Image (cartoon, helix red, strand yellow):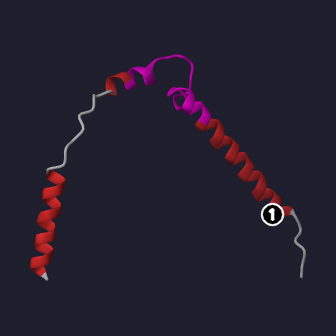
Amino acid sequence: MLRNLWALRQVSQKTISTASRRHMANKVKEKQKLFQEDNGLPVYLKGGPMDGFLYRFTMALTVFGTGYVIYELFVPRKSN
């Protein structure tokens, strides 16, 4: 049993270590410039149009969810 676990450990390490890696450009400096510039936008909207969409969608879900919870709390239920 221990021998099987040892073999499995060796195989898993070998396949992970030989996997090809993607070389991605470091974009940290660009993102720092974007998020630190003083353009009057809050930080959660500085990422572009998709950030604006996600913000509005989240706010709509929050308002809808709060309204639905209040509705469920105060609407009387029919008893059987």
Compared to 45, does 6 lie above or below?
below
Q: Amino acid at mark 1?
A: Leu
Compared to 37, does 16 lie above or below?
below
Q: Which residues are magenta?
A: 31-53
Q: Quadrant of residue 71?
A: bottom right
Compared to 44, does 18 lie above or below?
below
For the residue pair 51 and 18, the one nearer the viewer reads as 18
For the residue pair 73 and 21, the one nearer the viewer reads as 21
Residue at the location (68% across, 47% down)?
A: 61
Q: Picture coordinates of residue 45 (x, y %)?
A: 55, 29
Q: Quadrant of residue 7?
A: bottom left
Residue 36 magenta: yes
Q: Main secondary structure of the magenta part?
A: helix
Residue matched to label 1: 73
Q: Quadrant of the C terminus?
A: bottom right
Q: Picture coordinates of residue 72 (x, y %)?
A: 80, 62
Q: Picture coordinates of residue 5 (x, y %)?
A: 15, 75
Residue 38 magenta: yes
